[in-house]
Amino acid sequence: MTEIVASNPEVREFKSYPPKPRKLTGSSIAILVFLTMCAAFVAIPLYVIIVTSLKDMAQIRFGDIFSLPEVWTLEPWRVAWDEVCSGVTCEGVKIGFFNSIMILIPSLILSIGLSAVTGYALALWNVKWAGTFLFILFTAAFVPFQIIMIPLIIMSGIIKVYGTVWGVAIVHAVLAMPLLTLIFRNYYKDIPSEIMNAAIMDSGSFWKIFGEIILPMSGNIMIVVLILQITSIWNDFLIGLTFGGIGTKPMTVILANSVITSRGEVTYNVDMAAALLTAIPPLLIYFVLGKFFVQGITAGAIKG
Amino acid sequence: MPCVEFRNIAKQYGRVTVLDELDLTVEDGEFLVLLGPSGCGKTTLLNLLAGLIETTAGTITIDGRDVTEADPKDRGLAMVFQSYALYPTKTVRGNLRFGLSSQKLDKAEVDRRVAWAAKLLQIEPLLDRKPGQLSGGQRQRVAIGRALVKNVGVFLFDEPLSNLDAKLRTEMRLEIKRLHNELHQTIVYVTHDQIEAMTMATRIAVMDGGVIQQIGTPDEIYETPANLFVAQFIGAPAMNMLKGTLKVAGDRVTAQLDEVGAELDLSGHAFASAPENGAPIVAGLRPEHFSVGQTAESEATSFALPVRYTEKTGGDATAFLNTKSDNGLLAVRVDPALVAALESGGDLAVSFPASRINLFDARSGQRM
Ligand SMILES: Nc1ncnc2c1ncn2[C@@H]1O[C@H](COP(=O)(O)OP(=O)(O)OP(=O)(O)O)[C@@H](O)[C@H]1O
Ligand SMILES: [Mg+2]
């Protein structure tokens, strides 16, 4: 009886142990130095951009790019958002912001939807020539966009989507498909075959199984792919430039134009603010979903 | 009426032949257990029946209907998987409902069936939980429930109890048996556990290497194994196998068993075909058919051998005797009360009744 009481952890007296001394070995110093250098590589330019965007031109003219603002001002940000000129229109980068959103949403739906279904079919159904198809996809993942750009423009002209949001979305979906399909396929391969067998016996419907069983199990990988795609679609310049029409230029293109378009003095603070405004959405996504991103990459197999 | 019929089934993976020329009939309402060692093709056979893999040749009929090419969902089957295969993102109720998704039923009927199965399996309090929040035994019940709601004539089980602990396995064994007694559906049940097979089956098909070695009631399989494989596979501890040579002199048939140094009188044995002088045989003796000491029975063969060690498992005890061949062991079931008196090295005199001998042809492995 007494022994049972003693083995109960709550009854046992709490002992505190001295913390173990941490050792700073050669390898950990090397790693720390390396990581610090990596961080500095990104952090120093970022610092310059941020402080410049908060200075007024009077201070910038002195040329000390590392100094803190003497007068903190948000005026460059307002100008960048609302007034800066890109070509002949002077309405700020906000036009590009809304265009980018208009491009982002259909591109995301199209690219993720297409790749998820293709990956699901390749991983879990008996598709004839699945191996060959995968090989072609894998090869396609290495073809640079610039090589196929001109034929793609002609093709999108033929199906009458050139210069529209849908044209940009289709090109994004097509270009993302090889990599995303491989990601989805590898993720779905880990779904236990018995679950799939049970679903085939229960329902047998390709779409019903996808919608009711497989999609709800895809949370982790969806987050990973979502972050990848939001970043790459938002940051894209070339596809937006070549496939977008006059009214559908993404924010990156508007930004580039507004930096190039200069009347008189170069307003570095406005340029920096415009660049930061353009970079904020993907950053925000990282901050919000970053935790899940790491989980999703490491989670892999789905346990029943 | 035969419910499920396999005719001339072959299954090959590339150049590997797993099943070949296999015939099997399952009668209506039968509880057929497919029993065999790992890798012998049990799951393959079950998946062929379910339509989850394609046959290379042969036909499968269910209730007289040729389903060889039919879709899994159209075969009128329900299956319970080894890993339960519950849908992790659905609740228990959602799992049961999805089981009905290929049958076009109205909502009231779906709810009625789910309620019925939940009551039968006592999982009503669990209906709104996810599979991750259930214990192994509860998951197994849900998996059975998902099969039950379909209300089909044939149930398939692929080693459903092998992920459970010993106590739960015994409980679920009784549970499945009870369901069969209540509902009378045809069941095809795969296992490699002979206790499960012996306790649940109305008939057992013993498989090895893709071939059905014997099919019969549990008693037939145990008492009169058709060949050496079945004899050795069924029973724990396994049947003792002693080599010998037949001597035929007129009406008198005997066999000299060198390993135990005894002569077996086989005059009374019902041979399948006339015994042949000098034929090599294997005599199979079940450990529990030995009696310790001399018996009055004149038909019995007696001998004494030194004890190597004894094993006691609760109410049973087995003595392992050294045979005359190198490292040979003979298992003999003994009274647990006797074990204390048996010492290692001392001789134990035992006898074996001639009527219980299983005789096999050493060349073909078939029963004689
Ligand atoms: N997809 C496959 N490709 C090649 N060989 C396979 C394949 N699936 C099964 N086999 C082989 O078929 C044989 C029978 O497999 P099966 O799964 O039916 O065995 P089992 O009797 O169910 O065994 P266990 O008791 O271990 O589940 C095995 O030798 C296995 O290696
Ligand atoms: Mg198996």
Image (cartoon, coloured by chain):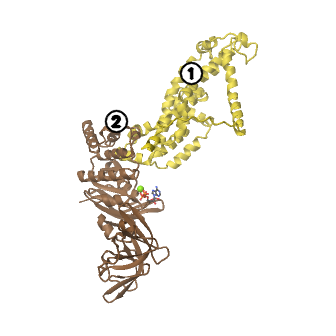
Q: Report the front residue among A108 and A36.
A: A36
Farthest residue, direction front: A2
Mark 1 or 2, closer to the camera: 2
Quadrant including the C terminus of chain B:
bottom left
Asked whether residue B211 appears in the rendered view, the answer is no
Residue at the spot of label 1: A246
Q: Report the front residue among A275 and A199.
A: A199
Circle 2: element type:
loop
Q: Is residue B325 left or right of residue A65?
A: left
Q: In terms of image quarters, where does ligand 1 lie? A: bottom left
Q: Report the front residue among B145 and B352.
A: B352
Protein chain holding label 1: A
Give coordinates of residue A111: x percent, y percent. 51, 34
| Residue A110 vertical placement versus B347 (above, below) | above
- The number of numbered badges drawn on the structure is 2
**Color used for chain B?**
brown
* Label at residue B269: none
Residue at the spot of label 2: B128
Q: Is residue A26 left or right of residue B12?
A: right
Asked if the residue at tag 2 contacts the one at tag 1, i.e. Cβ–Cβ closer than 8 Å, the answer is no
Chain letter for the yellow part: A
Q: Report the front residue among A218 and B284.
A: B284
